[in-house]
Image (tube, rainbow, N blue to C red):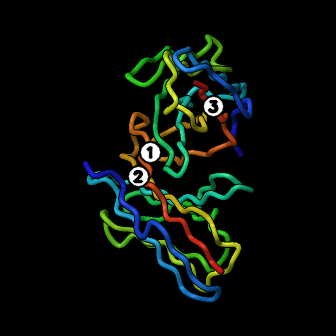
Amino acid sequence: DAGVIQSPRHEVTEMGQEVTLRCKPISGHNSLFWYRQTMMRGLELLIYFNNNVPIDDSGMPEDRFSAKMPNASFSTLKIQPSEPRDSAVYFCASSLAPSVNSPLHFGNGTRLTVT
Amino acid sequence: DAKTTQPPSMDCAEGRAANLPCNHSTISGNEYVYWYRQIHSQGPQYIIHGLKNNETNEMASLIITEDRKSSTLILPHATLRDTAVYYCIVRASGNTPLVFGKGTRLSVIA
């Protein structure tokens, strides 16, 4: 199993540009989570999906952020327009809901730098 | 908000057991205790979880007190590669996300 795959690993962009982060969950997993990590705020949940349906997006900072899951094997997190304060590491994770015995498996993240 | 309390940092000598405590005094009857760790520049990694019984796997042991208000993660023979931030999390069901606190930064020293 290749695990959760995120791309790109690093992204450097200028303020005002659109940024799209991608995630491929583990095959067969039906829950997908997007987290953001900064030194100041630690790991924060942005949004999560069950069976491709967004369940809770209350962690999305503002309307500039959007996430989609068009099918069970792909999700995107888009920031438009990007701002320097969006600089962070963004993690995607997947699990097999609803079992509590299914832990979250995380990707290695996308490090976003907005200049 | 995280429902757990952990010391911000700990040191452990290489080869010795690392015992990482966690307080979760408001845990509900249906909530499990999960432990994850995050090695620098990587995503969080699952270690172990339990409800009320002690658990052991190839990575660690989890000891949960009888009243379930606290737990201890034990790494029996710590190595330098175990240096990481360790997170203790309570979670009610597989449909819900993990809420991370600040964790314990464990430094294993040669």
Whole-percent x, y for residue B84 in the image: 57, 37
Three-letter amino acid code at the position of disc 3: Leu
The reply to whether the C-beta atoms of the residues labelled 2 and 1 are less than 8 Å apart is yes
Residue depicted at x 40% and y 63%: A6
Q: Residues within 10 Å of mark 3 (few under 14, many from 20)?
A: many
Look at mark 2 in the image and give the residue it sits on. A94
**Closer to the camera: disc 3 or disc 1?**
3
Three-letter amino acid code at the position of disc 2: Ser
Whole-percent x, y for residue A14 in the image: 61, 85
Look at mark 1 in the image and give the residue it sits on. A104
SS assignment at label 1: loop
Q: CA distance from mark 3 to mark 2?
A: 26 Å
Seen from this angle, which residue lies furthest front? B110
The reply to whether the C-beta atoms of the residues labelled 3 and 2 are less than 8 Å apart is no
Residue depicted at x 54% and y 38%: B37
Whole-percent x, y for residue B58 in the image: 37, 22
Look at mark 3 in the image and give the residue it sits on. B106
Residue depicted at x 59% and y 27%: B108
Q: Chain of mark 3?
A: B
Instruction: Name the disc covering residue B44, or none.
Output: none
